Image: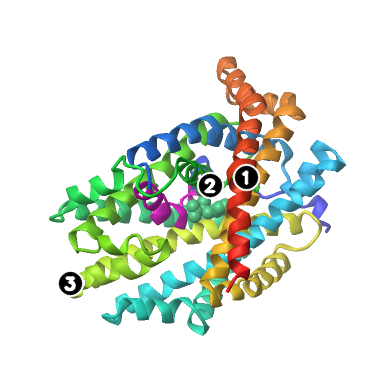
Amino acid sequence: MTTGTVQREAWGSRAGFILAAIGSAVGLGNMWRFSYVAAQGGGIYFVLLYLIFVAAVGIPVMTSEFAVGRLAQESPAKAIGRLGGKAWTPLGWLFVFCGFGILSYYSVIAGWTIRYSFDALRHAIPADTGGYFQAVSTGTGSVVGHVLFMAITIFIVLWGVRKGLERAALILMPILFIILVSLAIWSATLTNSGVGYAAFLNPELGAISVRSVINNAVGQAFFSLSLGMGALMTYASYLKSQQNLGKEATVVALTDFGVAFTAGLIVFPIIYSFGLSDQVGLSMVGALFISLPAGLQSLGQAGDWVVLTFFVMLFFAALTSAISLLEVVVTALVDHGISRRVAAIGAGLVITLAGIPSAFSIKFLTAADQVVGNFLLIVGGFFTAVLVGWKLLPLADAELAKGLASEKVRKGWAMLIRYFVPPVLLIVLVWIIIPETWDAVRALFSP
Ligand code: PHE
């Protein structure tokens, strides 16, 4: 039996697809980065700018990825060259490279959440959370967590779309939502919750320039919505049913925003109720992994339970995102005739090895995030918009028409993806992202 005659896998239900797409979007990016960058500059204005960007760029790009995915019924690595012509083939492989590159360092951070969860469960997080974080995040300890996390991700992807990806989303996402809401309610009862909310949404610019605020909003939107690297395109390629893809994209994007916003409502009251505000500026990762556990220690064992719940939520969020990252690589290999088992294990092993430098150096991890998780995603998003807006528009529009009857909405989408998204992304790339990326790479090589 050749792969050509094997029936392509498909989602078992609409809920399965939607929850898996939300699972991809909701990840480490939501749980901390969003509220952190908001508090850093712009506050509520940042939130509004972010929402406008999500509506005008994020949702149209996501709708395009959904349309091309369902239309193609195969991996982006194959479909993009087939639909767009030979010259577009590199874009499909850029997607695969991004899945590979992001997962390599994403899994390292996710590995830390495993270690934190275990130690919180054993009441074994030491008082010196700074030293503890050092030990967990660099060197062999970090490698162990990374390998463990990759093994779990590979194991789920091995099972395929319905038994692996869909089942994981159907189980993990509801638990994640319950934890999220419970923690937000608990946070609201803390003595200084109001001060925390105010710090999160404080409209002042702080030390940050308008340019950085835009950089943060655009980078955050692409990363958080899983755009620009074919993850959601891949998920849509397993769709058989003809639902309204514009609506699905809106649901995914708004849920992703809701989770990020709620996470801010959890984290900031904790920071301001346990006197940690002076540590927030230190570093993004540090504040999450050092300050939060330090503050909660004053609650004794009860604090350990909160830490446990929080890091388990982070772990679940990271897992459903990692699955989608690995799936982009695996589906490309499967479409080139390799069995899912060999593809998942083989790609997984190579990604595990590629993550080792990030497990040893946070500096390397940060640079990888800027290059692949920010710069390349926006490059991918730009070319996706050009391809769909200028080459595949009739095809993509016909695909959308299958569930999206309203011609007005489709016209609006077409206008945005053709005339608005490409120039906006190009300006942002040249003006902001390329200089920032250049700085990050230079910083890596300076002592
Ligand atoms: N969206 C995920 C997060 O916020 C990360 C991700 C990026 C997943 C790109 C898939 C593709 O953590």
Magenta part of the protein: which range? Answer: 20-40
Amino acid type for the residue under numbered disc 2: Gly
Q: Nearer the viewer, residue 36 or 437?
A: 437
Q: Is residue 174 left or right of residue 271?
A: right
For the point 60% across and 33% down, the residue is 424
Say whether disc 1 or disc 3 marks the residue closer to the N-terminus.
Answer: 3
Q: Secondary structure at mark 3?
A: helix
Residue under the image location 75 percent in, 48 percent down: 92
Q: Which residue is mark 1?
A: 378
Mark 2 or 3 closer to N-term?
A: 2
Disc number at residue 298? Answer: 3
Q: Secondary structure at mark 1?
A: helix
Instruction: Classify 300 as above or below 406.
Output: below
The quadrant of the image that shows the C terminus is bottom right
**Label 2: which residue?**
219
Number of other residues with Cα within 10 Å of mark 3, as a class: few under 14, some 14 to 19, many 20 or more: few
- Residue 413: x percent and y percent? 59, 24
Q: Quadrant of residue 96?
A: bottom right
Circles 1 and 3 in contact, beta carbons < 8 Å: no
For marks 1 and 3, give the CA distance. Answer: 42 Å
Q: How many marks?
A: 3
Q: Which is in the foreground here, disc 2 or disc 3? A: 2
| Residue 166 visible at all | no
Q: Amino acid at mark 3?
A: Ser
Disc 2 + disc 1, Cβ < 8 Å: yes
